[in-house]
Image (cartoon, rainbow, N blue to C red):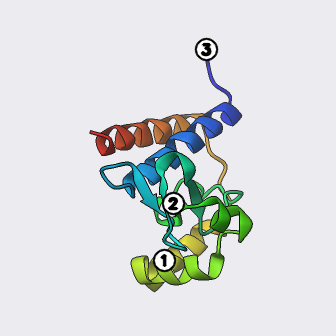
Amino acid sequence: MKKTPRQLKAKLDKVFSLYIRTKYADWRGNVACYTCGRIHPIKSIQCGHFIRRQHLATRWDENNARPQDYGCNVGQGGNYDVFALKLLKEIGQEGLEELQRKKDTPKKWKLAELESLLEYYQQKLAETTQ
C-alpha cells in the first residue's frame, strides 16, 4: 500500500529524530541536551531544530538538528540564542548561512524524495545502533 506524503513525513520525522538522538548518545543511551547540557535517557530527549520544522528544506538537515530536552526545546522555544551560538562554533558562519539559504528556498518534497530520505536515515540509524 502506497503511503501518502503526510504519512511519509510523519515516519521520516520519527526516524530522523531517533537518529539525531542516537547519534549524540553515549554507550549507555544517555544524551546531553545541546543547549543546557543536562543528561537524559534517549527516550526523554527530543530532536530540536535551529530553523523551525515548518521550513521543509531544512527539516531533515543534520546541520539543523540537535538533541534537546523538553525544557529547552518547548519550554524555552528552542533556547534559540544558546543553540545559535553553539551551532556557529560547530558548523561555522558558512554552515549557518547555508541553512538560511535553504530555509528561504521553498521546498515541495516529491514522494520518491521522501521515500529515499526515509531509507537513508533508516540506514544511518541502523549503522549508529550497531
Which numbered disc flags the more N-terminal residue, 1 or 2? 2
Looking at the rendered structure, the secondary structure element under dot 1 is helix
Which numbered disc flags the more N-terminal residue, 3 or 2? 3
Going by the numbered disc 3, the residue's amino acid type is: Met
Q: Is residue 78 above or below residue 43?
A: below
The residue positioned 51% from the left and 40% from the top of the image is 15
Name the residue carrying label 3.
1
**Which marked residue is nearer to the observer: mark 3 or mark 1?**
1
Q: Residue furthest top?
A: 1
Looking at the rendered structure, the secondary structure element under dot 2 is strand
Q: Nearer the viewer, residue 92 or 45?
A: 45
The residue positioned 29% from the left and 41% from the top of the image is 127
Residue 56: x and y in percent read 65, 55
Q: Nearer the viewer, residue 122 or 109?
A: 122
Which disc, if any, is residue 67? Answer: 2
Going by the numbered disc 1, the residue's amino acid type is: Leu
Q: Is residue 32 above or below residue 128?
A: below
Residue 34: x and y in percent read 50, 69
**Cα distance, mark 1 to mark 2?**
12 Å
Name the residue carrying label 1.
87
Going by the numbered disc 2, the residue's amino acid type is: Pro
Location of residue 74 by image quarter: bottom right
Q: How dense is the environment of label 2, judged by Cα within 10 Å: few (below 14), some, or many (20 and up)?
A: many
